[in-house]
Image (spheres, helix red, strand yellow):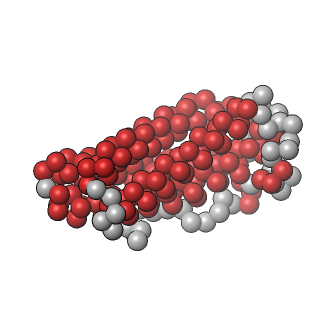
Amino acid sequence: MLDTQYSIREADMPEDMRFLLNTYPRDTWEAHPGFREKTQHWMAAHQGFRMLAERVRLDTELLLDKDMALDDYAARLSFLGGRLVGNLHGHHGWEDRSYFPELCAADPRFAAGLEVLEQDHADLDVVLDDFTRQANRVIKLAELDEGQARDEAGAVLDQATAIEAFLNRHLGDEEDLAVPIILHHRLRG
């Protein structure tokens, strides 16, 4: 169940922002000589974020179904949730300071898509902040009131589900926009 308080962009990137994707479709990237280690690492980081978000959601479902002990859940939520939020903030900061300016300089058409991606980052930050507050509350309640901690874990599930949906939409679009530019201009080699 996805809490509707978060606005997740559902539409694909506009076609004019996917300007090189037809020339460099996703299923050809790995075979392209310009698909080098730095781009592979960037995409691996994205896959790691997807997996962490899924794991937090699945763990929360296990807790709510009473298939995971609260102490185990709180420890995992602290570690995995902290890792997800901290690494996402660091990754997005690096993209905004370094990666995206490089892509804009190489191909000014990237700027139109960048506006969409930056709004996604801002929208995701709201969900991450809410998730952090709620996860910390559940972790604290795990020590104080098991029943209330389990009750409030439902909000963590809503937020984890929202994070997962944001990442699936945003990271796919980000890759579809950036990787063809990287391949076309032979960047990040």
Q: Position of residue 32 (x, y in %)?
A: 86, 42
Write the residue at 36% across / 59% down: 60
Instruction: Depth check: give the residue in front, 94 or 87.
Output: 87
Instruction: Depth check: give the residue in front, 9 or 26.
Output: 26
Asked if residue 176 lies left or right of residue 141, the reply is: right
Q: Is residue 171 above or below residue 96?
A: below
Q: Is residue 2 above or below residue 56?
A: below
Q: Position of residue 5 (x, y in %)?
A: 37, 65
Q: Position of residue 127 (x, y in %)?
A: 39, 53
Write the residue at 64% across / 38% down: 42
Q: Is residue 181 above or below residue 23?
A: above
Instruction: Depth check: give the residue in front, 72 or 108.
Output: 72
Write the residue at 70% across / 44% down: 178
Q: Position of residue 40 (x, y in %)?
A: 70, 38
Asked if residue 172 lies left or right of residue 109, the reply is: left
Image quadrant containing the N terminus: bottom left
Write the residue at 78% across / 28% down: 189
One can see residue 105 in this view: no
Asked if residue 106 lies left or right of residue 9, the reply is: right
Count how many numbered circles sit on residues in the image: 0
One can see residue 31 in this view: yes
